[in-house]
Amino acid sequence: MKILKLAMWAPILALAACAHPPLRPADAQSEPPAAKAPAPKPRTVVRPTANPQVLPKQELSQAILFKLLLAEISLQRGQVNVAMQSFLELTRETRDPRIAQRATEVAWNARFLGVALETAGIWLAADPESLRARQVLAALLVDEARLDDAQPHLQKWLAADRENVGHNFLELNTLLARHPDKAAVLQLTQKLAQPYLTLPEAHYSIAQAAWNADQSQLALTEIRAALTLRPEWEQAAQFQGQLLQRTSNADALAYYQEYLKSHPRAMDVRLNYARLLVTGKKYPEARSEFQAMLTEFPNNPDVALAVGLLSFQLKDYDAAEAQLLLALETHHKDPDAVRFYLGQTNEEANRFGEALRWYASINEGEQYVPARVRYATILAKQGKLTEARKYLQESALDAQQRVQFTQAEAQLLRDANDYRAAYDVLDQALEKNPNSPELLYDHAMAAEKIDRIDVLESNLRKVIQIKPDYAHAYNALGYTLADRNTRLQEAYTLIEQALKIVPEDPFIMDSMGWVLYRMSQHDAALTFLKRAFELRPDAEIAAHLGEVLWAAGQRDEARKIWDSALKNDPGNELLLATVKKFSE
């Protein structure tokens, strides 16, 4: 028999120990995900407390004990429906806030939102002073798009926790961000903030809601109000810089520069300023900022890492390596990430032995898979494709990693132009994982390379069925049809759906431009292709944009786009073929 986790016994032990003087509910072992935001000042933790006068003097009867055991054991065995039915019955029968809290947490985590709403309501009714119960109920109402119902609970939550109201406003933004009607969220945020306009966090909250509702001027007004109340607040200063950057990099740079005169130790603002200088190709000024940061914050691992990454962007690999090593020496909180960047830096500098050493030093964690993939990629570049494939095949520690390493192996084969072998590797993997969206998608892309369009279409339609929000499956199928100049209206509909899911993806915009071109809508095609190229100056997007410009009679502009792209990616097959087609 399995040993049950102690957490599952919390409601049972609480009842058994306190049939007469009820105890406070135990700290939640699996709380619903609460909105988190960095607080500008330390926060007093408010724990959920129960009012002894309203708690029932609950005797632990045999029937209650049986249902509690049934619920918890069913949950551990994965029988969520059975567990939820028991929790719901217990909550209704006992009206005990401890059981209601546990039921709510389990229902939320299992996405039984209707049950969670009912049990959270019982929890709050039984313990009306519980801030946690009120916060959870409000969050559930927001999840269900019931903003009007959530409003009074949010108002009471803010009013009852005056000591932490500033921090709670920052949490509020994360909570309300789930709601799709951004204008309604802004209106609600303004109402909630009205009694607290002397708090900078209230103005910050309105500014963020305004940003999400595409009301940039209101956002700017509110963030300036927040900074008037608390000029030293870096988080707000960064936000103002981002707002300005939306319309003008120059305005953002000027603002950061002015702010840093008064607050020279605002490290995050200085980092943003340096990044913006690099983006604007103001390299001398960026290097000057690097030096200022290193002087102002010596032996700070976060600064060392940031300067190392910025130096990497500037292709100053020696400087990047020096700062990344400093970040390691000063005990950066994520040493494996630093080791991965050291591997990348040495790889870009063609110091492959050092790169392999750094990648091999990562044996677990988030960087494990990408490090192993980069290691194998270097082996393949050195002509050791067989060794690289074996390395990947032996690296998987679990089923998920096995899928990821199979994808990487297939990519190495594609890079080597062995498309048939890539198809076969993915085909074999699909026999063991027939419903893996990732494998199905990659197999479809491999099928296209060997002209198995039937396999591509069936795979992508299966991906869409399994995972309806997989935007790139719609896009890949739509683009394939458009590229073959067939079923264009269907192609347009597929790509349109992909854009609804991910509106600002440059590759999906490229596909939309391409299908519109095939449909002879050149002006509309150029709108999408220019925006895609602006977001991502990729060689294949450049090929498409140049072709449509050429067809529209803008041949000099087309050549300019192609020439620029060829400098950055001289070996791109589609770009080379497109230039050749229009040069003959």
Image (cartoon, rainbow, N blue to C red):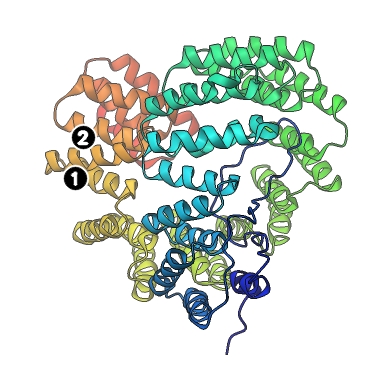
**Mark count:** 2
Which of the 4 image quadrants contains residue 245? Answer: top right
Mark 2 residue type: Val
Q: Which residue is mark 1?
A: 481
In the image, 266 versus 189, the foreground residue is: 189
- Mark 1: which secondary structure? helix
Please provide percent x and percent y for residue 468. 29, 52
Q: Residues within 10 Å of mark 1 (few under 14, many from 20)?
A: many
Please provide percent x and percent y for residue 257. 70, 12
Q: Residue at x 71, y 30 (%)?
A: 40
Give above or below for 39 relative to 65.
above
- Considering every residue shown, the one lying at the far bottom of the view is 1
State yes or no: discs 2 and 1 in contact (Cβ < 8 Å).
yes
Please provide percent x and percent y for residue 249. 56, 15
Q: Residue at x 43, y 38 (%)?
A: 150
The answer to whether residue 584 is visible is: no
In the image, 407 versus 329, the foreground residue is: 329
Mark 1 residue type: Leu
Q: Residue at x 75, y 22 (%)?
A: 287
In the image, 125 versus 500, the foreground residue is: 125
Task: Judge from the rendering whether residue 496 lies leftward or rightward of residue 264; answer left or right.
Answer: left
Task: Look at the image and tell me in which quarter the N terminus lies.
Answer: bottom right
Task: Judge from the rendering whether residue 282 lies leftward or rightward of residue 494; answer left or right.
Answer: right
> Residue 515: which numbered mark, if any?
2
Give above or below for 373 relative to 526.
below
Q: Is tag 2's residue or tag 1's residue first in the polypeptide sequence?
A: 1
